[in-house]
Image: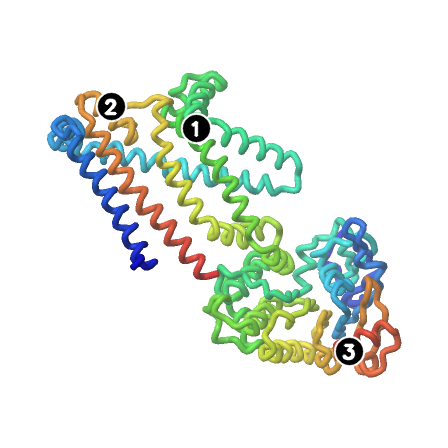
Amino acid sequence: MSTDLIDVHAPAIDIQGLVKSYGDNEVLKGIDLTVLAGEVVCIIGPSGSGKSTLLRSVNLLEVPTGGHILIEGIDVTDEDTDLDRVRQRIGMVFQSFNLFPHMTVLGNLTIAQRRVKKRGKAEAERIAREMLGRVGLAEKADAYPSHLSGGQQQRVAIARALCMNPDMMLFDEPTSALDPELVGEVLQVMRSLADEGMTMLVVTHEMGFAREVGSRLIFMDGGHILEQGDPREVLANPQHPRTQDFLSRVL
Amino acid sequence: MALRRSQKQKLYRYAVYVVLIAIAVWVALTANWARLVPLFLNPEVALKMLPSIITVGLVNTLWFTAVAFVAGLILGVILALMKMSVIGPFRWIATVYVELFRGLPAILTIFTIAFILPIAAGVPGKDLGGPVVLGLIGLILVAAAYMAETIRAGLQAVPKGQTEAARSLGMSPMATTFWIVIPQGFRIIIPPLTNEFVLLLKDTSLLFVAGTFIWSKELTTFARDASTQNANGTPLIMAALLYLIVTIPLTRFTAWLERRMARER
Protein backbone atom coordinates (compact mmCIF):
# COMPACT_ATOMS: atom_id res chain seq x y z
CA MET A 1 0.00 0.00 0.00
CA SER A 2 1.10 3.54 -0.57
CA THR A 3 1.57 5.87 2.34
CA ASP A 4 1.10 8.84 0.06
CA LEU A 5 -2.68 8.53 0.05
CA ILE A 6 -3.60 10.80 2.93
CA ASP A 7 -7.30 10.92 3.63
CA VAL A 8 -7.87 14.61 4.30
CA HIS A 9 -11.17 13.87 5.99
CA ALA A 10 -9.68 11.33 8.39
CA PRO A 11 -8.82 12.42 11.93
CA ALA A 12 -5.20 13.50 12.47
CA ILE A 13 -4.76 10.74 15.03
CA ASP A 14 -7.13 7.85 15.54
CA ILE A 15 -6.14 5.41 18.29
CA GLN A 16 -8.23 2.25 18.55
CA GLY A 17 -7.95 -0.21 21.43
CA LEU A 18 -4.27 0.52 22.06
CA VAL A 19 -2.61 -1.98 24.41
CA LYS A 20 1.03 -1.86 25.47
CA SER A 21 2.73 -4.17 27.91
CA TYR A 22 6.29 -4.73 29.04
CA GLY A 23 6.36 -8.39 29.95
CA ASP A 24 3.58 -8.88 32.50
CA ASN A 25 3.27 -5.15 33.14
CA GLU A 26 0.37 -3.76 31.13
CA VAL A 27 0.96 -0.01 30.80
CA LEU A 28 -1.86 0.85 28.37
CA LYS A 29 -5.06 -1.12 28.77
CA GLY A 30 -7.10 -0.39 25.67
CA ILE A 31 -6.96 3.29 24.78
CA ASP A 32 -9.39 4.84 22.30
CA LEU A 33 -8.63 8.41 21.33
CA THR A 34 -9.40 10.53 18.30
CA VAL A 35 -7.66 13.84 17.66
CA LEU A 36 -9.04 16.01 14.87
CA ALA A 37 -6.95 18.37 12.76
CA GLY A 38 -6.43 21.67 14.60
CA GLU A 39 -7.20 20.26 18.04
CA VAL A 40 -4.86 20.86 20.97
CA VAL A 41 -5.29 17.88 23.28
CA CYS A 42 -3.54 17.93 26.62
CA ILE A 43 -2.96 14.76 28.64
CA ILE A 44 -2.49 14.90 32.39
CA GLY A 45 -2.19 12.22 35.01
CA PRO A 46 0.05 10.88 37.75
CA SER A 47 3.44 9.43 36.90
CA GLY A 48 3.17 5.85 35.71
CA SER A 49 -0.30 6.47 34.32
CA GLY A 50 0.88 5.61 30.78
CA LYS A 51 0.52 9.12 29.32
CA SER A 52 4.08 9.29 27.93
CA THR A 53 3.83 5.74 26.61
CA LEU A 54 0.60 6.70 24.83
CA LEU A 55 2.26 9.74 23.25
CA ARG A 56 5.33 7.77 22.22
CA SER A 57 3.12 5.11 20.65
CA VAL A 58 1.65 7.62 18.20
CA ASN A 59 4.87 7.72 16.15
CA LEU A 60 5.75 4.17 17.16
CA LEU A 61 8.75 4.98 19.35
CA GLU A 62 6.90 2.46 21.49
CA VAL A 63 5.58 -0.46 19.46
CA PRO A 64 2.03 -1.30 20.56
CA THR A 65 1.23 -4.78 21.83
CA GLY A 66 -2.29 -4.53 20.46
CA GLY A 67 -4.74 -2.19 18.76
CA HIS A 68 -4.39 0.22 15.86
CA ILE A 69 -3.10 3.76 15.38
CA LEU A 70 -4.17 5.66 12.29
CA ILE A 71 -2.34 8.82 11.29
CA GLU A 72 -4.42 10.76 8.76
CA GLY A 73 -6.09 7.51 7.85
CA ILE A 74 -2.88 5.48 7.53
CA ASP A 75 -2.50 2.57 9.93
CA VAL A 76 1.03 2.94 11.34
CA THR A 77 0.71 -0.35 13.21
CA ASP A 78 0.45 -2.05 9.79
CA GLU A 79 3.76 -3.78 9.07
CA ASP A 80 3.68 -2.55 5.46
CA THR A 81 3.50 1.13 6.38
CA ASP A 82 6.65 3.13 5.68
CA LEU A 83 7.21 4.51 9.18
CA ASP A 84 9.95 6.95 8.17
CA ARG A 85 7.48 8.63 5.81
CA VAL A 86 4.68 8.91 8.35
CA ARG A 87 7.08 10.18 11.02
CA GLN A 88 7.97 13.17 8.84
CA ARG A 89 4.41 14.35 9.30
CA ILE A 90 4.55 13.98 13.10
CA GLY A 91 6.86 16.43 14.88
CA MET A 92 8.04 15.30 18.30
CA VAL A 93 9.42 17.33 21.19
CA PHE A 94 11.04 15.53 24.12
CA GLN A 95 11.37 16.35 27.79
CA SER A 96 15.17 16.23 27.52
CA PHE A 97 15.28 18.20 24.21
CA ASN A 98 17.53 15.59 22.53
CA LEU A 99 19.29 18.10 20.32
CA PHE A 100 22.30 16.65 18.49
CA PRO A 101 25.24 17.98 20.54
CA HIS A 102 27.83 17.49 17.79
CA MET A 103 26.07 19.87 15.41
CA THR A 104 25.32 23.56 15.46
CA VAL A 105 21.73 24.73 15.75
CA LEU A 106 21.65 25.09 11.98
CA GLY A 107 23.04 21.56 11.60
CA ASN A 108 20.34 20.23 13.93
CA LEU A 109 17.67 21.92 11.83
CA THR A 110 19.00 20.90 8.42
CA ILE A 111 20.22 17.31 8.87
CA ALA A 112 16.83 15.62 8.47
CA GLN A 113 15.71 18.07 5.78
CA ARG A 114 18.80 17.16 3.76
CA ARG A 115 19.02 13.43 4.46
CA VAL A 116 15.31 12.64 4.57
CA LYS A 117 13.53 15.29 2.52
CA LYS A 118 16.55 15.56 0.19
CA ARG A 119 16.35 19.34 0.18
CA GLY A 120 19.35 21.27 -1.09
CA LYS A 121 21.69 23.01 1.34
CA ALA A 122 20.45 26.52 0.55
CA GLU A 123 16.78 25.60 0.75
CA ALA A 124 17.23 23.64 3.99
CA GLU A 125 19.09 26.56 5.58
CA ARG A 126 16.49 29.06 4.44
CA ILE A 127 13.72 26.98 6.03
CA ALA A 128 15.83 26.44 9.16
CA ARG A 129 16.39 30.18 9.60
CA GLU A 130 12.70 30.85 9.03
CA MET A 131 11.73 28.34 11.76
CA LEU A 132 14.40 29.71 14.10
CA GLY A 133 12.80 33.11 13.62
CA ARG A 134 9.44 31.66 14.57
CA VAL A 135 10.80 30.47 17.91
CA GLY A 136 12.67 33.76 18.41
CA LEU A 137 16.21 32.39 18.10
CA ALA A 138 17.29 33.66 14.67
CA GLU A 139 20.62 34.85 16.07
CA LYS A 140 21.56 31.42 17.49
CA ALA A 141 21.95 29.59 14.16
CA ASP A 142 25.68 29.01 14.59
CA ALA A 143 25.67 28.20 18.32
CA TYR A 144 26.15 24.69 19.68
CA PRO A 145 23.35 23.29 21.86
CA SER A 146 25.58 23.16 24.95
CA HIS A 147 25.89 26.96 24.80
CA LEU A 148 22.13 27.49 25.00
CA SER A 149 19.85 27.63 28.02
CA GLY A 150 17.34 24.83 28.52
CA GLY A 151 14.51 27.03 27.29
CA GLN A 152 16.45 27.96 24.17
CA GLN A 153 17.34 24.31 23.54
CA GLN A 154 13.70 23.30 23.73
CA ARG A 155 12.70 26.10 21.34
CA VAL A 156 15.38 24.89 18.92
CA ALA A 157 13.96 21.37 19.27
CA ILE A 158 10.53 22.71 18.35
CA ALA A 159 12.01 24.54 15.35
CA ARG A 160 13.81 21.33 14.31
CA ALA A 161 10.51 19.46 14.26
CA LEU A 162 8.81 22.30 12.35
CA CYS A 163 11.45 22.16 9.61
CA MET A 164 9.92 18.89 8.41
CA ASN A 165 6.58 20.70 7.87
CA PRO A 166 4.66 18.30 10.13
CA ASP A 167 0.87 18.14 10.15
CA MET A 168 0.86 17.54 13.90
CA MET A 169 3.14 17.86 16.90
CA LEU A 170 3.64 15.60 19.91
CA PHE A 171 4.99 17.17 23.11
CA ASP A 172 6.28 14.85 25.84
CA GLU A 173 6.43 16.95 29.02
CA PRO A 174 8.28 19.70 27.13
CA THR A 175 8.80 21.97 30.15
CA SER A 176 9.44 19.40 32.89
CA ALA A 177 13.23 19.56 32.63
CA LEU A 178 13.32 23.37 32.66
CA ASP A 179 14.11 25.82 35.42
CA PRO A 180 10.86 27.59 36.38
CA GLU A 181 11.88 30.93 34.87
CA LEU A 182 12.45 29.27 31.47
CA VAL A 183 9.10 27.51 31.22
CA GLY A 184 7.25 30.59 29.97
CA GLU A 185 9.27 31.10 26.78
CA VAL A 186 8.61 27.50 25.67
CA LEU A 187 4.91 27.67 26.48
CA GLN A 188 4.74 30.94 24.54
CA VAL A 189 6.10 29.22 21.41
CA MET A 190 3.67 26.32 21.88
CA ARG A 191 0.80 28.78 22.30
CA SER A 192 1.66 30.55 19.05
CA LEU A 193 1.78 27.18 17.27
CA ALA A 194 -1.67 26.37 18.60
CA ASP A 195 -2.92 29.78 17.49
CA GLU A 196 -1.70 29.02 13.97
CA GLY A 197 -3.87 25.90 13.96
CA MET A 198 -1.27 23.19 14.55
CA THR A 199 -2.69 19.86 15.70
CA MET A 200 -1.07 19.14 19.04
CA LEU A 201 -1.00 16.29 21.52
CA VAL A 202 0.66 17.48 24.72
CA VAL A 203 1.60 15.50 27.83
CA THR A 204 2.08 18.17 30.46
CA HIS A 205 1.92 19.22 34.09
CA GLU A 206 1.23 22.84 33.11
CA MET A 207 -2.43 23.16 34.09
CA GLY A 208 -2.47 26.83 33.11
CA PHE A 209 -1.41 25.97 29.56
CA ALA A 210 -3.96 23.16 29.39
CA ARG A 211 -6.73 25.47 30.52
CA GLU A 212 -5.91 28.43 28.29
CA VAL A 213 -4.60 26.76 25.13
CA GLY A 214 -6.03 23.25 25.16
CA SER A 215 -9.18 22.45 23.25
CA ARG A 216 -9.55 19.20 25.18
CA LEU A 217 -8.13 17.79 28.39
CA ILE A 218 -7.60 14.10 29.05
CA PHE A 219 -6.98 12.58 32.45
CA MET A 220 -5.19 9.23 32.49
CA ASP A 221 -4.49 6.83 35.30
CA GLY A 222 -3.53 3.17 35.43
CA GLY A 223 -3.37 2.81 31.65
CA HIS A 224 -6.91 4.09 31.08
CA ILE A 225 -8.41 7.38 29.98
CA LEU A 226 -10.66 8.11 32.94
CA GLU A 227 -12.06 11.47 31.97
CA GLN A 228 -11.94 13.93 29.10
CA GLY A 229 -13.63 17.12 28.05
CA ASP A 230 -13.33 20.88 27.86
CA PRO A 231 -10.22 21.78 29.90
CA ARG A 232 -11.96 24.53 31.89
CA GLU A 233 -14.79 22.16 32.71
CA VAL A 234 -12.57 19.21 33.72
CA LEU A 235 -10.23 21.36 35.82
CA ALA A 236 -13.03 23.26 37.57
CA ASN A 237 -15.46 20.43 37.95
CA PRO A 238 -13.82 16.98 37.68
CA GLN A 239 -16.27 14.07 37.63
CA HIS A 240 -14.13 11.00 38.29
CA PRO A 241 -12.96 10.61 41.92
CA ARG A 242 -9.37 9.86 40.75
CA THR A 243 -9.34 13.06 38.72
CA GLN A 244 -10.62 14.98 41.74
CA ASP A 245 -7.93 13.40 43.90
CA PHE A 246 -5.14 14.13 41.37
CA LEU A 247 -6.21 17.73 40.78
CA SER A 248 -6.56 18.41 44.50
CA ARG A 249 -2.90 17.43 44.89
CA VAL A 250 -1.42 19.36 41.93
CA LEU A 251 -3.51 22.53 41.89
CA MET B 1 59.94 17.72 72.14
CA ALA B 2 58.40 15.15 69.83
CA LEU B 3 58.40 15.82 66.06
CA ARG B 4 55.33 17.52 64.68
CA ARG B 5 53.30 15.73 62.01
CA SER B 6 54.52 17.91 59.15
CA GLN B 7 58.15 17.53 60.27
CA LYS B 8 57.77 13.75 60.35
CA GLN B 9 56.39 13.77 56.81
CA LYS B 10 59.27 15.91 55.60
CA LEU B 11 61.84 13.64 57.22
CA TYR B 12 60.26 10.59 55.63
CA ARG B 13 60.28 12.25 52.19
CA TYR B 14 63.99 13.14 52.46
CA ALA B 15 64.80 9.59 53.56
CA VAL B 16 63.18 8.28 50.37
CA TYR B 17 65.18 10.74 48.24
CA VAL B 18 68.42 9.67 49.90
CA VAL B 19 67.74 5.99 49.27
CA LEU B 20 66.83 6.58 45.63
CA ILE B 21 69.93 8.69 45.00
CA ALA B 22 72.08 6.08 46.71
CA ILE B 23 70.70 3.36 44.40
CA ALA B 24 71.32 5.54 41.31
CA VAL B 25 74.88 6.30 42.38
CA TRP B 26 75.56 2.63 43.13
CA VAL B 27 74.28 1.60 39.68
CA ALA B 28 76.30 4.36 37.98
CA LEU B 29 79.49 3.42 39.82
CA THR B 30 79.26 -0.35 39.51
CA ALA B 31 77.99 -0.59 35.90
CA ASN B 32 80.59 -1.63 33.41
CA TRP B 33 80.59 1.65 31.45
CA ALA B 34 83.75 0.80 29.58
CA ARG B 35 81.86 -2.03 27.91
CA LEU B 36 78.35 -0.53 27.87
CA VAL B 37 79.11 2.71 26.02
CA PRO B 38 80.89 1.30 22.95
CA LEU B 39 78.35 -1.52 22.71
CA PHE B 40 75.08 0.38 23.19
CA LEU B 41 75.82 4.10 22.85
CA ASN B 42 78.35 3.97 20.06
CA PRO B 43 78.37 7.27 18.06
CA GLU B 44 80.02 5.68 15.03
CA VAL B 45 77.38 2.98 14.71
CA ALA B 46 74.68 5.55 15.40
CA LEU B 47 75.87 7.75 12.52
CA LYS B 48 75.90 4.73 10.23
CA MET B 49 72.26 4.06 11.06
CA LEU B 50 71.18 7.52 9.99
CA PRO B 51 69.09 8.28 8.12
CA SER B 52 67.97 4.75 7.10
CA ILE B 53 66.69 3.77 10.56
CA ILE B 54 64.25 6.66 10.19
CA THR B 55 63.56 6.68 6.45
CA VAL B 56 63.09 2.89 6.30
CA GLY B 57 62.47 1.56 9.82
CA LEU B 58 60.36 4.30 11.38
CA VAL B 59 58.58 5.20 8.14
CA ASN B 60 57.59 1.56 7.56
CA THR B 61 56.38 1.25 11.15
CA LEU B 62 54.22 4.35 10.75
CA TRP B 63 52.86 3.18 7.39
CA PHE B 64 51.99 -0.29 8.67
CA THR B 65 50.37 1.22 11.77
CA ALA B 66 48.30 3.65 9.71
CA VAL B 67 47.10 1.00 7.26
CA ALA B 68 46.27 -1.50 10.02
CA PHE B 69 44.54 1.19 12.10
CA VAL B 70 42.30 2.47 9.31
CA ALA B 71 41.42 -0.99 8.00
CA GLY B 72 40.98 -2.31 11.56
CA LEU B 73 38.73 0.63 12.38
CA ILE B 74 36.46 0.00 9.39
CA LEU B 75 36.25 -3.72 10.17
CA GLY B 76 35.81 -2.84 13.86
CA VAL B 77 32.80 -0.60 13.11
CA ILE B 78 31.20 -3.38 11.08
CA LEU B 79 31.82 -5.88 13.90
CA ALA B 80 30.49 -3.45 16.53
CA LEU B 81 27.30 -2.89 14.52
CA MET B 82 26.96 -6.66 14.06
CA LYS B 83 27.33 -7.14 17.82
CA MET B 84 24.48 -4.69 18.41
CA SER B 85 22.30 -6.15 15.65
CA VAL B 86 18.84 -7.59 16.28
CA ILE B 87 19.78 -10.43 13.92
CA GLY B 88 21.10 -13.30 16.02
CA PRO B 89 23.64 -14.82 13.59
CA PHE B 90 25.28 -11.39 13.12
CA ARG B 91 25.76 -11.12 16.89
CA TRP B 92 27.10 -14.68 17.14
CA ILE B 93 29.58 -14.26 14.29
CA ALA B 94 30.88 -10.99 15.73
CA THR B 95 31.16 -12.45 19.23
CA VAL B 96 33.06 -15.53 18.03
CA TYR B 97 35.35 -13.32 15.93
CA VAL B 98 36.18 -10.97 18.79
CA GLU B 99 36.72 -13.77 21.32
CA LEU B 100 38.90 -15.69 18.85
CA PHE B 101 41.27 -12.91 17.85
CA ARG B 102 41.47 -11.34 21.31
CA GLY B 103 42.13 -14.72 22.85
CA LEU B 104 45.08 -15.60 20.61
CA PRO B 105 48.59 -14.11 20.75
CA ALA B 106 48.90 -11.59 17.89
CA ILE B 107 52.14 -13.18 16.75
CA LEU B 108 50.41 -16.55 16.29
CA THR B 109 47.57 -14.96 14.30
CA ILE B 110 49.93 -13.06 12.00
CA PHE B 111 52.08 -16.11 11.39
CA THR B 112 49.15 -18.47 10.83
CA ILE B 113 47.27 -16.11 8.50
CA ALA B 114 50.38 -15.54 6.39
CA PHE B 115 50.85 -19.30 6.24
CA ILE B 116 47.23 -20.38 5.67
CA LEU B 117 45.90 -17.77 3.24
CA PRO B 118 48.09 -18.71 0.24
CA ILE B 119 47.30 -22.40 0.76
CA ALA B 120 43.59 -21.72 1.13
CA ALA B 121 43.59 -19.56 -2.00
CA GLY B 122 45.72 -22.12 -3.84
CA VAL B 123 48.16 -19.54 -5.13
CA PRO B 124 51.72 -18.58 -4.15
CA GLY B 125 51.97 -16.02 -1.35
CA LYS B 126 53.44 -13.42 -3.67
CA ASP B 127 50.22 -13.39 -5.71
CA LEU B 128 48.38 -12.29 -2.57
CA GLY B 129 50.71 -9.32 -2.10
CA GLY B 130 53.60 -11.14 -0.50
CA PRO B 131 54.64 -11.23 3.16
CA VAL B 132 53.97 -7.51 3.76
CA VAL B 133 50.32 -7.70 2.76
CA LEU B 134 49.78 -11.12 4.35
CA GLY B 135 51.31 -9.97 7.61
CA LEU B 136 49.21 -6.81 7.60
CA ILE B 137 46.04 -8.84 7.07
CA GLY B 138 46.80 -10.75 10.28
CA LEU B 139 47.51 -7.53 12.15
CA ILE B 140 44.30 -5.92 10.85
CA LEU B 141 42.24 -8.91 11.98
CA VAL B 142 43.67 -8.60 15.49
CA ALA B 143 43.29 -4.80 15.58
CA ALA B 144 39.64 -5.02 14.49
CA ALA B 145 38.82 -7.44 17.30
CA TYR B 146 40.15 -5.06 19.95
CA MET B 147 38.62 -1.97 18.36
CA ALA B 148 35.20 -3.62 17.90
CA GLU B 149 34.70 -3.80 21.66
CA THR B 150 35.80 -0.19 22.17
CA ILE B 151 33.58 1.06 19.35
CA ARG B 152 30.57 -0.90 20.61
CA ALA B 153 31.00 0.62 24.07
CA GLY B 154 31.19 4.09 22.50
CA LEU B 155 28.12 3.63 20.33
CA GLN B 156 26.11 2.27 23.26
CA ALA B 157 27.16 5.26 25.38
CA VAL B 158 25.24 7.59 23.04
CA PRO B 159 21.96 8.37 24.83
CA LYS B 160 18.86 6.60 23.50
CA GLY B 161 17.12 9.98 23.15
CA GLN B 162 19.48 10.83 20.28
CA THR B 163 18.28 7.85 18.26
CA GLU B 164 14.67 8.62 19.15
CA ALA B 165 15.02 12.24 18.07
CA ALA B 166 16.53 11.21 14.73
CA ARG B 167 13.94 8.49 14.08
CA SER B 168 11.08 10.84 14.99
CA LEU B 169 12.36 13.20 12.28
CA GLY B 170 11.90 10.36 9.79
CA MET B 171 15.56 9.37 9.53
CA SER B 172 16.10 5.70 8.67
CA PRO B 173 17.98 3.39 11.06
CA MET B 174 21.02 3.53 8.78
CA ALA B 175 20.99 7.33 8.44
CA THR B 176 20.57 7.62 12.22
CA THR B 177 23.55 5.36 12.84
CA PHE B 178 25.73 7.14 10.30
CA TRP B 179 24.89 10.79 11.02
CA ILE B 180 23.92 10.78 14.69
CA VAL B 181 25.23 7.77 16.61
CA ILE B 182 28.65 7.13 15.04
CA PRO B 183 29.88 10.77 15.17
CA GLN B 184 28.96 11.03 18.85
CA GLY B 185 30.19 7.55 19.74
CA PHE B 186 33.59 8.27 18.22
CA ARG B 187 33.98 11.46 20.19
CA ILE B 188 33.57 9.40 23.34
CA ILE B 189 36.16 6.79 22.32
CA ILE B 190 38.96 9.00 20.99
CA PRO B 191 41.06 8.39 24.15
CA PRO B 192 40.77 4.56 24.14
CA LEU B 193 41.24 4.53 20.35
CA THR B 194 44.47 6.51 20.74
CA ASN B 195 45.65 3.90 23.22
CA GLU B 196 44.83 1.19 20.71
CA PHE B 197 46.80 3.09 18.08
CA VAL B 198 49.83 2.99 20.39
CA LEU B 199 49.36 -0.75 21.04
CA LEU B 200 49.06 -1.32 17.30
CA LEU B 201 52.20 0.71 16.63
CA LYS B 202 54.12 -1.57 18.96
CA ASP B 203 52.50 -4.70 17.52
CA THR B 204 53.83 -3.88 14.03
CA SER B 205 57.08 -5.26 15.44
CA LEU B 206 55.48 -8.71 15.14
CA LEU B 207 55.11 -8.44 11.35
CA PHE B 208 58.54 -10.00 10.82
CA VAL B 209 57.04 -13.47 11.38
CA ALA B 210 55.26 -13.15 8.02
CA GLY B 211 58.65 -12.52 6.39
CA THR B 212 60.38 -9.29 5.37
CA PHE B 213 62.31 -7.71 2.52
CA ILE B 214 65.12 -5.23 3.04
CA TRP B 215 62.76 -2.40 2.07
CA SER B 216 59.90 -3.62 4.21
CA LYS B 217 61.62 -3.87 7.61
CA GLU B 218 59.80 -2.02 10.35
CA LEU B 219 61.69 -0.35 13.17
CA THR B 220 62.27 -3.35 15.45
CA THR B 221 63.34 -5.74 12.68
CA PHE B 222 65.48 -3.05 11.11
CA ALA B 223 67.24 -2.40 14.44
CA ARG B 224 67.63 -6.07 15.29
CA ASP B 225 69.18 -6.91 11.91
CA ALA B 226 71.43 -3.83 12.04
CA SER B 227 72.57 -4.74 15.52
CA THR B 228 73.44 -8.27 14.38
CA GLN B 229 75.33 -7.01 11.32
CA ASN B 230 77.33 -4.49 13.36
CA ALA B 231 77.70 -6.72 16.43
CA ASN B 232 76.55 -3.68 18.36
CA GLY B 233 73.43 -2.85 20.42
CA THR B 234 73.28 0.86 19.53
CA PRO B 235 70.57 0.40 16.83
CA LEU B 236 68.29 -1.19 19.46
CA ILE B 237 68.64 1.85 21.73
CA MET B 238 67.98 4.15 18.77
CA ALA B 239 64.86 2.18 17.85
CA ALA B 240 63.66 2.42 21.44
CA LEU B 241 64.09 6.20 21.41
CA LEU B 242 62.27 6.50 18.08
CA TYR B 243 59.30 4.49 19.40
CA LEU B 244 59.12 6.73 22.46
CA ILE B 245 59.27 9.89 20.35
CA VAL B 246 56.04 8.74 18.70
CA THR B 247 54.25 7.02 21.57
CA ILE B 248 54.84 9.44 24.46
CA PRO B 249 53.21 12.45 22.75
CA LEU B 250 50.27 10.21 21.83
CA THR B 251 49.73 8.97 25.39
CA ARG B 252 50.14 12.55 26.69
CA PHE B 253 47.55 13.64 24.11
CA THR B 254 45.18 10.94 25.39
CA ALA B 255 45.64 12.08 28.98
CA TRP B 256 44.97 15.69 27.93
CA LEU B 257 41.83 14.69 26.03
CA GLU B 258 40.54 12.72 29.01
CA ARG B 259 41.11 15.67 31.34
CA ARG B 260 39.35 18.01 28.92
CA MET B 261 36.37 15.67 28.49
CA ALA B 262 36.09 15.22 32.25
CA ARG B 263 35.92 19.03 32.58
CA GLU B 264 33.21 19.31 29.94
CA ARG B 265 30.88 16.90 31.70
Mark 1 belongs to chain: B
Coordinates of residue A88 in the picture (x, y in percent): 65, 61
Q: Secondary structure at mark 1?
A: helix
Residue A131 appears in the picture as rendered: no
Dot 3 corresponds to which residue? A215
Mark 3 belongs to chain: A
Coordinates of residue A173 in the picture (x, y in percent): 68, 69
Dot 1 corresponds to which residue? B106
The residue carrying pointer 1 sits among few (fewer than 14), some (14 to 19) or many (20 or more) residues within 10 Å by Cα, namely many
Q: Secondary structure at mark 3?
A: loop
Q: Are marks 1 and 2 on the same chain?
A: yes
Task: Give the total number of marks visible in the rendering.
Answer: 3
The residue carrying pointer 2 sits among few (fewer than 14), some (14 to 19) or many (20 or more) residues within 10 Å by Cα, namely some
Residue B124 appears in the picture as rendered: yes
The residue carrying pointer 3 sits among few (fewer than 14), some (14 to 19) or many (20 or more) residues within 10 Å by Cα, namely some
Select label 3 or label 1 by which is in front: 1
Mark 2 belongs to chain: B
Q: Are marks 3 and 1 on the same chain?
A: no
Q: Quadrant of the C terminus of chain A?
A: bottom right
Q: Is residue A59 left or right of residue B49?
A: right
Dot 2 corresponds to which residue? B225
Select label 3 or label 2 by which is in front: 2
Q: Are marks 3 and 1 in contact (CB under 8 Å)?
A: no
Q: Amino acid at mark 2?
A: Asp
User: Marks 3 and 1, Cα distance to the nearest angstrom?
Assistant: 68 Å
Of residues B150 and A99, the one nearer the viewer is B150
Mark found first going from the N terminus, 1 or 2: 1
Q: Are marks 1 and 2 in contact (CB under 8 Å)?
A: no
User: Marks 3 and 2, Cα distance to the nearest angstrom?
Assistant: 84 Å
